[in-house]
Amino acid sequence: MAPEKTAVEMHPQRWGDPAAATPLNDAARGLVELAFGLHEHPPVRSSPVPAPAIDPALLDALRELVGAEHVLTDDDTRRLRTRGKSTPDLLRARAGDLSDAPDAVVRPGGPDDVAALLAFAVEHHLAVVPFGGGTSVTGGLAARRDGYAGVVSLDLVRMKRLVAVDPVSMTATLEPGLRGPEAEALLAEHAMTLGHYPQSFEFASIGGFAATRSSGQSSAGYGRFDSLVVGLTVATPQGPLVLGSAPASAAGPDLRQLVLGSEGAFGVITSVTVRVRHLPAVTAYEGWRWRSFAEGSAAMRTLAQAGLLPTVIRLSDETETAINLARPDEIGGAGAGGCLMIVGYEGTPRRPRPGRRR
Ligand SMILES: Cc1cc2nc3c(=O)[nH]c(=O)nc-3n(C[C@H](O)[C@H](O)[C@H](O)COP(=O)(O)OP(=O)(O)OC[C@H]3O[C@@H](n4cnc5c(N)ncnc54)[C@H](O)[C@@H]3O)c2cc1C
């Protein structure tokens, strides 16, 4: 294997910066036309959202609980909390199907509000859907309505505190509504990082990362989100769950696993304690082009099995490579074929690329 390699500048913390947008190259345009038979960008129509199907008296009671300004029933707010951002979700929304819209969006201010809302929901038989950043791709944000008195989207947007930092154990406790960049900004004040960069980083939340067992661009080096979680507090209809207290324990089953990846089915995550690291002094990213996906994946497997994974390693298949390399001057040009691999190293100024030589 003798891949061509060239440095490529990466911005792992940006997601779809409109100012940096470039037109699709011909290959990518061709793929879109082939897949969808489209030659034009169809206009976006704003479809009507079904009227809230919930007893107004229940809405008044919810307003009493969290404050009138935090119970929202307008169409735009409910439209944005209808399902997630998977391709089927987007196509259904685009086709005007907003039948899964919640009846109300409720924004608790803290764990006590969440507990009170869940108790209220149990008493009045309301379905509750926790909502973080809304980037779900697995259907977790679509509620079953059958038999319920209404569907409430429980938006954690007000719960954005860095609750505690432990520089000795290198852990931090974060509230669930913090989005990726907000969490990193708060940790950076302590020269710390979580190092969790899924492609949805800009919008996805801490609670969502835990509820979906999220994996990020740097997970080869930092670990997947669930492996970073030391402890969780969860509000459930039966009362609070406090899971995990020490950085490690061998006593009994690990009940954190009930909540990690649960998609909010068992309760609402109200805080997450995570392992953090010191901010890296130097980061270096480079792009490699492999002749085929098989060659690239063989290289990745070799590195993984030898314990030599860099901080970031991501291989695109031929199609994604053609779409991503929009500019002809990037790594041999869009038409050069093959598969793009992004590799990133983090270290100190004296050892900027630990592991790279090996
Ligand atoms: C363009 C794009 C790129 C993506 N890239 C990645 C990627 O690289 N890696 C990856 O792993 N995923 C990726 N995803 C999927 C998605 O971003 C992740 O699953 C993310 O973790 C969801 O976080 P969120 O805050 O948006 O959660 P939401 O979409 O709001 O919710 C996701 C699920 O978690 C539940 N939930 C949310 N918050 C809580 C809480 N506090 N307590 C209990 N349950 C809760 C919800 O009810 C729902 O079931 C991507 C999605 C998109 C649209």
Image: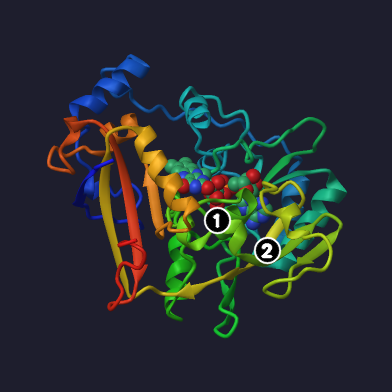
Classify mark 2 as within 8 Å of ligand 1 or not, answering yes or no: yes
Q: Residue at the far bottom: name it.
A: 168
Image quadrant occupied by the N terminus? top left
Query: Judging from the image, what secondary structure is the residue with disc 2 in?
Result: strand
Residue drawn at (32%, 45%) of the image = 341
Q: CA distance from mark 2 to mark 1?
A: 20 Å
Residue drawn at (39%, 47%) of the image = 314
Nearer to us of marks 2 and 1 is 1
Residue drawn at (33%, 34%) of the image = 320
Q: Is residue 175 visible?
A: yes
Q: Is residue 171 above or below residue 70?
A: below
Query: Judging from the image, what secondary structure is the residue with disc 1 in?
Result: loop
Task: Give residue 67's position: percent from left, percent from top.
Answer: 66, 62
Viewer-nearest residue: 170 or 188: 170
Q: Quadrant of residue 136?
A: top right
Q: Is residue 130 above or below residue 157?
A: above
Going from the N terminus, do you reach mark 2 or mark 1 first? 1
